[in-house]
Amino acid sequence: MLFSTLETERLKLVEITQIHAESLFEILSLDEVTRYYGTDSFTSIEEAKKLIDMFQKNFYEKRAIRWGIILKENNKFIGTLGLNGLQLKNKKAEIGYEIHPFYWRKGYTSEAIKEVLRYSFLELEINRIGAVVYLENQASINLLEKLGFSKEGVLRDYLYQNDQFHTTNMLSLLIHEWKTTALNSFGAKAN
């Protein structure tokens, strides 16, 4: 499987390499970003470098795909988005993302997710994309529901972060639901 660069009107979704380590560290060292990320805030650039190595290893082992979100207008790295727990044989994955707070509420995350959903359902032929979201992360829950995801249930004490357990919501989107949502709401071509 070759890494696919994706594009939207304002964004390029690219393979994350070590040239992005400083930008990734800048984002993941912010408590407001990692609060609902499932990991503690980074304290050194070495953590970002190791994470990038893990992204690449998981991709080559076909267990995950993680894109860097780049603004087309200035080539600024503003976050990441990807498929975790990728199981091509079972046609499922979980989506995850984070973006620098300066770029929150500007539609970038939604724009990037829509393109990854299109790629996942049409190119990878995924049937189900899940999302594990902290109960308190209402902004992310609202975004996913706007994109057609449905709440399935609660995962009790599912994530361990900052020395405590956190309960999460489980949301999902199936290909047939996405096709209906994409055609009706977003004008996407969902053949």
Image (cartoon, rainbow, N blue to C red):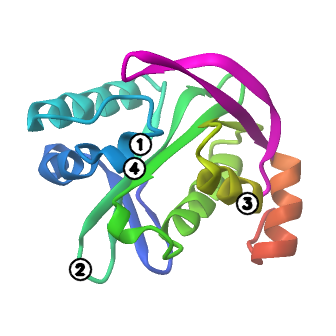
Would residue 119 be visible to someone looking at this image?
no
Element at label 1: strand
Labels 3 and 4: the sequence-earlier one: 4
Question: Mark on residue 66?
Answer: 1
Q: Residues within 10 Å of mark 4 (few under 14, many from 20)?
A: many
Q: Give the side of residue 14 with respect to residue 4, left or right.
A: left
Residue 169: in magenta span: yes
Q: Residue at x 77, y 38 (%)?
A: 127
Residue 47: in magenta span: no
Residue closest to the eye, 100 or 64: 100
> Is label 3 or label 4 in front?
3
At which x and y percent is residue 108?
48, 70
Q: Give the main secondary structure of the magenta stretch.
A: strand
At which x and y percent is residue 80?
38, 51
Residue designated by label 4: 67
Q: Amino acid at mark 4?
A: Trp
Q: Quadrant of residue 158?
A: top right
Residues in magenta, as a range = 147-174
Residue designated by label 3: 147
> Is label 3 or label 1 in front?
3
